[in-house]
Image (tube, rainbow, N blue to C red):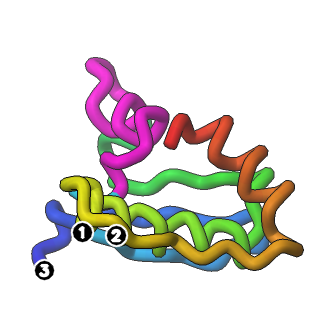
Amino acid sequence: MRKEDTVKLISAEGFEFVIHKDAAMVSQTIRNMLTSPGSFAETEHGEVTFPEISTTILEKICKYFYWNLQFASGKETEFHIEPELTLELMMAANYLHT
């Protein structure tokens, strides 16, 4: 995978997830950050930092992005969410518009 085809998502603890740009674009917020005109750091460096999202939650979000790419075409399948992560995931999803 080429660097320009990837995006680095950085959690509150500084953990970095390098994912395919198509997967990151599942999020409307990330899409806007990466495609907005102007000289935004996110656009120039292909990195987005989430100071309010923990590593555990960001990892689950990245998994969801890939799941969404694979199964959004209507195939019935479930994305498993551990009950203890539900509240944090809902807050992050609201922010990320996923």
The residue at which mark 2 appears reads as 66
- Residue 91 rendering spot, x and y as whole percentages: 77, 45
- Residue 46 rendering spot, x and y as whole percentages: 34, 54
Q: Nearer the viewer, residue 76 or 38?
A: 76
Looking at the image, residue 95 sits to the left or right of residue 32; the answer is right
Q: Which mark is residue 79?
A: none
Reply above or below: 21 against 34: below
Task: Describe the element under mark 1 as helix, strand or loop.
Answer: helix
The residue at which mark 1 appears reads as 70
For the magenta stretch, what is the residue range? 24-39
Task: Describe the element under mark 3 as helix, strand or loop.
Answer: loop
Q: Residue at x 47, y 74 (%)?
A: 63
Q: Residue at x 48, y 34 (%)?
A: 29
Give yes or no for contact between labels 1 and 2 (Cβ–Cβ under 8 Å): yes
Q: Quadrant of residue 85?
A: bottom right
The residue at which mark 3 appears reads as 1
Please report whichever mark, 2 or 3, sits nearer to the chain's N-terminal start: 3
**Disc number lying in front (3 or 1):** 1
Q: Amino acid at mark 1?
A: Gln
